[in-house]
Amino acid sequence: MYAFQDHYPENLSHCYGCGSQNPHGHQIKTEWEGDETVTRFRPEPFHTSVPGFAYGGLIASLIDCHSTASAAAAMYRQEGRSMDSLPAFRFVTGSLHVDFLKPTPIDAELVIRGQVKEIKGRKVVIESQVWARTVMTAKGVVVAVQMPENFGT
Ligand SMILES: CCCCCCCC/C=C\CCCCCCCC(=O)SCCNC(=O)CCNC(=O)[C@H](O)C(C)(C)COP(=O)(O)OP(=O)(O)OC[C@H]1O[C@@H](n2cnc3c(N)ncnc32)[C@H](O)[C@@H]1OP(=O)(O)O
């Protein structure tokens, strides 16, 4: 699988949620399945909240990085360009909203599915759902904004 995150340049691959160069992070991988974006993640025992269940911050960070990657992919797709082409689209999180619907089991693969709800100017809105087996345990909305040139200054 060649994921959206595999197109991030090495100097921007240290993110805790999605950076392939961060050995302590989740290193999530996201791809298209039709018009949806999909990430699969297997929680580890150290992601526990209540014994048997996953920590909410883990769920939120999965939705976060799934969505910023989805935003970039959506922008490229709208322009009919490959994710390797320039200029690059890089997105950061403007807002992250998560609803925790059910406890998320720690011993199941989690599947995060995202839909592109809006693309307007530098902003992309992504809605996502987290599934554990047949249960939707959380859903989220992210407003992703194209990283400004002067980010961090
Ligand atoms: C520190 C990490 C850096 C990573 C750099 C990575 C580069 C990407 C490369 C590879 C990916 C790897 C990394 C993925 C990252 C994973 C996810 C994270 O954890 S990111 C970290 C957390 N987020 C921030 O630290 C953002 C801090 N905030 C800001 O820098 C600004 O506030 C920013 C860029 C979000 C917006 O500021 P404006 O001045 O550029 O843009 P304006 O003009 O205000 O807004 C543009 C549109 O976005 C909406 N918008 C902005 N903020 C919003 C918000 N909070 N809620 C709703 N809408 C918002 C606005 O309403 C506007 O929409 P209308 O055009 O009016 O429709």
Image: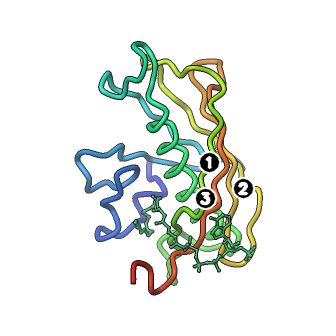
Vertical side of 48 occupied by 145: above or below: below
With 99 as the anchor, is 21 left or right in this view?
left
Q: Nearer the viewer, mark 3 or mark 2?
A: 3
Disc 1 marks a residue whose amino acid type is Thr
With 36 as the anchor, is 6 left or right in this view?
left
- Badge 2 vs badge 1, beta-carbon distance below 8 Å: yes
Q: Pointer 3: what residue?
A: 95
Vertical side of 26 occupied by 151: above or below: below
Q: Quadrant of the C terminus?
A: bottom left
Would you call the spot at circle 3 few (<14 residues within 10 Å), some (14-19), or many (20 or more)? few
Residue at the spot 65% in from the left edge and 60% down from the top edge: 143
Spot occupied by residue 81 in the image (x, y as percentages of width and height)? 61, 74
- Whole-number angstrom distance, CA of label 2 to CA of label 1: 9 Å
Q: Pointer 2: what residue?
A: 116
Circle 3 SS class? strand
Vertical side of 35 occupied by 41: above or below: above
Please report whichever mark, 2 or 1, sits nearer to the chain's N-terminal start. 1
Disc 3 marks a residue whose amino acid type is Ser
Q: Pointer 1: what residue?
A: 37
Label 2 CB-ligand 1 distance < 8 A: no
